[in-house]
Each structure stands twice: as structure tokens, then as C-alpha cells.
Image (cartoon, rainbow, N blue to C red):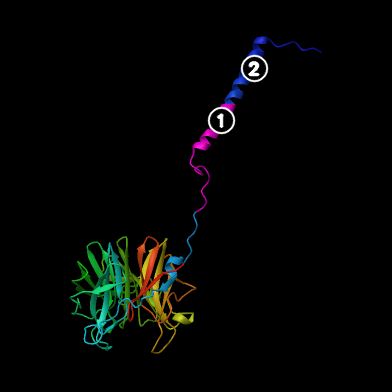
Amino acid sequence: MILPKAPKSLLDRLLTVCRKAWWIACWLSLLGVAAVAAEPKGSKLPMAPAAVAPEFPAELVKFSPYEHNPIFTAEGPGHWDVKIRERGWILRERDQWRMWYTGYDGKRESIKQLGAATSADGLKWQPDANNPIYRQHWVEDMMVVHQGDTYYMFAEGKDDQAHWLTSPDGLQWTRQGVLDIRRTNGQPIPPGPYGTPTAWCEGGTWYLLYERGDRAVWLARTADLKTWTHVQDEPVLTPGPDAYDREAIAVNQVIRYAGRYYAYYHGTGQKTAPRQWTTNIAMSTDRVHWKKYAGNPIAPGDVSSGIVVETAPGQFRLYTMHDAVRAFMPSR
């Protein structure tokens, strides 16, 4: 059967439409290739999920002793600082490094006084000509926070009673009194020693870790620096179970890095003197629950009162302070 031919005008219209569609498809294809070629490489590709940082980044735990240790020692017999005692503190402020440390005559019962030193590189130090810069009260095992226009010092006083001082310049210090620490119900903590106060400030709230006889570490907070209240009445960090810190611990510094908190602390596994103290690290995401690094201790030998100073973004130097200042350089 022979079908009748469609009117020529209709065929012409259909062919015209098909040709236009074909040309449009070709042009769209060419434009697509050109657009892809013009885009930065990978700009339209789905981004791979960001790598999750390890719980203990290498830059916080891998250190090697500086070849010229110790980098700072007491002046010795005949001077105010026959020996250096426990934790000191180092801040890097612009191009200057500042250090505060405790000196004494070497006798356990003698008053502990505050000294200062400066450095251009954190390795070669010059003691302040006016040392000791604070003589009025016992200052031991101290740390410093520079917040706004004020330097805040938290330290042990006589009989291991934690107290705090303030200064406009880090040299002229005024004692503000002992730390008033309360249990969650508002009652004062039981009488007795409480020391190695380690403080930091976040969003207007101050946090404090402190120890009692090196038996455990508690967490408190305050908004006014007058009354500190426990976050919980149970310790947040305790000795053990491993041998290096099985008997005693004390936190020296807390930093926030890569979204987590890191506490540098010292510990010992020995019950009686002379005890060997180790330098260690623990991690937390909420300040309350802490996980100890499986590779502790992070510094070899009997070195304690360790802190870190950031020398460049993501680069740290470890210092131990008792009974001489030693540096530990990054090692990967």
C-alpha cells in the first residue's frame, strides 16, 4: 500500500526543527566542554571530607632534648637563687620571650621568691637585674596568663595554699589573696594543701585545675575570679594505672588545640623520695573527661613541671622547669 505523501510544507518544517535541535545540542556540548576547561581544576568536584586530626598530634607529643641543655639554671651559692624550685612559666610575646621562675636558698622551709628573665630566642636567657622581683610572699609552682592589660599569676603560697597575684607589666606584682574554692553545694573545700593551680580563660569564664597532695586533680570555674566552684566534686584526673604516674600527678598547663584540650602534667610511680618525675600529656573534649597518651612519658629522664610554647603556627617547643630549665625541640 502506498501512503500519501505529507504536504511538503510540513516536511520542511519538521526537518527545520530537527536541524535546529541538532545544532543546539552541538553548541551546548561545545559550551559545556569550554566551561569545564575554563574552571579551576576540581572546582566542581565534591570535596573529600576533612581529615580528622589524631587525638595526640605529633607536634604536641614528639620532642627531643636540646643539645645545649640545661638552658637556664640557678645562680648558685651566694645568690638569692641557690636553686630553682618546681614550675616556672614562659610566654612568647611578639619578638620577646619572658620567663618567671622560683628561686630559694636550697632549704625546703625557706621562703620561695619570684624571679624573671628575658630572651630573644627562648634558649639564651638574661635574668632581670632586679631579681627577685617579688619578695613579700611565698611564690612557688606558678603560672601566668596575660589577659587584656593584666598579667594574672596563680601560684602556691606557704603551706601549699594556692593564691593569685596581678600585674600591669609582669614585673610589679600585687597579691590578691588565696583562691576561694567551693564544692558544688557552695561549701568551701576541706582544709589542707591545695596547689599547682593551672588556670585559663574562655569566653569570660575562668577554669582552674588544681591538685591536693598530688593525689588527684580537680576542676573549678569562676566568672569573677573571687569564688571558684567545682564543676564536679569528683577528681577529673587521677594517678595510674600505668607505672609512670601511678602514685602522684599534677597538671602544669592546659592548651586548646585542633578543637581539643591538652593537659601537660607530671607524675611519678614512686611512693617515697627520691622520686623520679615524668612529663606527660592527656587529652579532653569537655575539660572533665581526660584520656592519657599511650606513649607517655613524652620527655626522657627525671624532668617535670613541663609546659609548651608555640613558636610558629602548629609548631611547639617543650620546656621542663624543675630543677633547671630544659628545652625539648620538635621531632617527627
Q: Which amino acid type is marked by label 1?
A: Leu
Residue 3 falls left or right of residue 197: right
Which one is earlier in the sequence, the residue at label 1 or at label 2? 2
Q: Quadrant of the N terminus?
A: top right
Q: Give how far across and how far down residue 10 sits, in percent.
A: 65, 12
> Is 156 on the left or on the right of 217, as rendered?
left
Q: Does residue 75 belong to the magenta stretch?
A: no
Residue at label 1? 30
Q: Residue furthest front?
A: 68
Magenta segment = 25-49
Q: Using the image as rendered, state which of residue 195 and residue 282 is in the foreground.
A: 282
Judge from the rendering whether residue 230 lies leftward or rightward of residue 19; answer left or right. Answer: left
The residue that label 2 is drawn on is: 15
Q: Residue 242, which numbered label?
A: none
Q: Residue at x 32, y 60 (%)?
A: 203
The reply to whether residue 287 is visible in this rendering is: no
Q: Position of residue 37 (x, y in %)?
A: 52, 37
* Front residue (pair 264, 206): 264
Disc number lying in front (1 or 2) = 1
Q: Is residue 203 visible?
A: yes
Q: Give the residue type at disc 2.
A: Leu
Name the residue at 20% across, 80% down: 137
On screen, residue 51 versus residue 199, left or right, reads right
227 or 38: nearer the viewer: 38
